[in-house]
Image: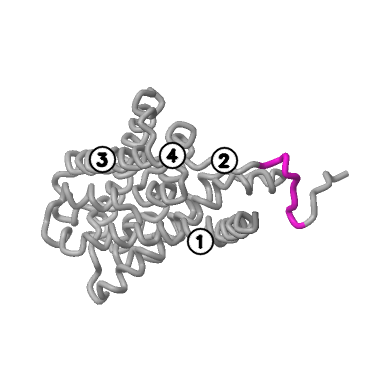
Amino acid sequence: MTKDVPEHGSYGAKDYHDPPPAPLFDAEELTKWSFYRALIAEFIATLLFLYITVLTVIGYKSQSLADECGGVGILGIAWAFGGMIFILVYCTAGISGGHINPAVTFGLFLARKVSLIRAVMYMVAQCLGAICGVGLVKAFQSSYYKRFGGGANELSLGYSTGVGLGAEIIGTFVLVYTVFSATDPKRSARDSHVPVLAPLPIGFAVFMVHLATIPITGTGINPARSLGAAVIYNQDKAWDDHWIFWVGPFIGAAIAAFYHQFILRAGAAKALGSFRSSSHV
């Protein structure tokens, strides 16, 4: 006998309550060890993410130089990025939320999931972790690092700045939209009969976006990843269009936050309904 499931995904009010929005400023966080533990988790996770992924990129380029069919190829690079996000989000979600990306943190901040203090400090930890991670790659692959571009993001030949920016916006939208959907507590309450391992769809989103945008920008969708590679590589071509890898992801994250909170979650309709109710009192 199968368990009865409410039609159309309906659920009782007692099953779910929206969590209160995070305060804009929460100075009390600075007094808690859990806050600093989360910062350490974000730093280490981003360090490991950049170390494995950039090392994979450098290794592929060095192997394919002698044999065009050698190395892991673009598919393998995409798997490295998506797989590491799956692993690291799984490991750190219970400690810091497993952001590992300033764009994800920015989107969650706009949705009032984290405070301003936490958002800024997460971004600092992520960027420092990325720089250290790429620094390890350079130390271990010094003979190949500069020769093969240091894993830095740059706009590929034949693509305009507008195309590169658009690719970063759309790619980050896919990622942040997936993060919101996979971690939505309302969805967990409504679809409790459908088990969802949140890191899995998030990792797959990163994998799919890399397949689509590696030929265009090398795929940023993570400002910390782009900054870490640019700082350690430190060549003009890594900085020429670097702004794309900040502006694009932040715009994409903002659109995803708005779409999920105000369209899918009907935040705008609720706000309008609340306003109308108060105006008739």
Q: CA distance from mark 4 to mark 2?
A: 12 Å
Amino acid carrying label 3: it is: Gly
Nearest to the eye among marks 1 and 3: give it: 1
- Please report whichever mark, 3 or 2, sits nearer to the chain's N-terminal start: 2
Verify CB contact (< 8 Å) between mark 4 and mark 3.
Answer: no
Is 270 situated left or right of 117 in this image?
right
Q: CA distance from mark 4 to mark 3?
A: 32 Å
- Please report whichever mark, 2 or 1, sits nearer to the chain's N-terminal start: 2
Nearest to the eye among marks 3 and 2: give it: 2
Percent position (x, y) of residue 216?
31, 68
Is 90 drawn above or below residue 168 in the view shown?
A: above
Which residue is under mark 3? 133
Which residue is under mark 4? 23
Q: CA distance from mark 1 to mark 3?
A: 33 Å
Tell me the number on the disc at residue 19: 2
Amino acid carrying label 1: it is: Tyr
Q: CA distance from mark 2 to mark 1?
A: 19 Å
Q: Between residue 122 and residue 114, name the one nearer to us.
A: 114
Q: CA distance from mark 4 to mark 1?
A: 21 Å
Percent position (x, y) of residue 28?
38, 28
- Please report whichever mark, 4 or 3, sits nearer to the chain's N-terminal start: 4
Is 161 drawn above or below residue 88 in the view shown?
A: below
Tell me the number on the disc at residue 259: 1
Q: CA distance from mark 3 to mark 2?
A: 35 Å
- Please report whichever mark, 4 or 1, sits nearer to the chain's N-terminal start: 4
Nearest to the eye among marks 2 and 1: give it: 2
In this picture, which residue range is highlighted in magenta?
8-16
Amino acid carrying label 4: it is: Pro
